[in-house]
Image (cartoon, helix red, strand yellow):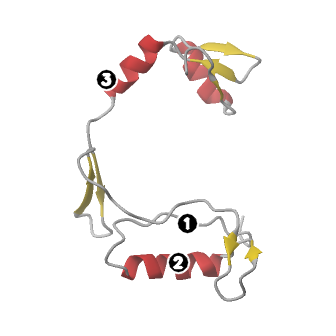
Amino acid sequence: MLERTGVRLLLPRAVKLVREAGGLVRDTDHIRIPRELVSWALAAAPRSVTLYDRGGAPALVLDGTSTAYGPGSDCLHILDHRSGERREPVLAGVVSGVRLADALDGIDFVMSMFLPADVD
């Protein structure tokens, strides 16, 4: 798909890097990446990634052999559990969500969850 159809890449610096690595660029932001370049990137990528807790201790190894659960990230809207209304999230909701997720035994990691509308 990356070689034949390609994707839009909206970061000019990244487009430049793809071009310099041998990718094809059309219309300033439509890139196609040859299969050889994709194969090289996959071979060069680490086979596992370790995530650490706030104290610096290993907390989660991502190596394709296990499953980890956590909340999603970057939601632009939420369904308010109190009012039932769909609305933009605010920073206080991020704080509450992170506290809740951190306290739950079944959650292995916590991401940003929401993009609060009340901060830049």
Question: Which residue carries the number 2 mark?
Answer: 97
Q: Does 112 sit above or below residue 27?
A: below
Of residues 50 and 120, the one nearer the viewer is: 50
- Lower sequence index among marks 2 and 1: 2
Amino acid carrying mark 3 in the image: Ala
Residue in the image at 59% along x and 28% along y: 14
Residue in the image at 55% along x and 21% along y: 2
Q: Does 1 sit above or below residue 78?
A: above
Q: CA distance from mark 1 to mark 3?
A: 31 Å
Amino acid carrying mark 1 in the image: Met
- The N terminus, quarter of image: top right
- Lower sequence index among marks 2 and 3: 3
Q: Does 15 sit above or below residue 26?
A: below
Q: Does 41 sit above or below residue 36?
A: below
Mark number for residue 113? 1
Query: Residue 46, located in which quarter of the rendered image?
Result: top left
In the figure, is residue 66 to the left or right of 111? left
In the figure, is residue 116 to the left or right of 70? right
Residue in the image at 63% along x and 19% along y: 5
Residue 24 in picture, x, y percent from top left: 62, 12
Q: CA distance from mark 2 to mark 3?
A: 37 Å
Label 2 crowding class (10 Å Cα cut-off): few <14, some 14-19, many 20+? some
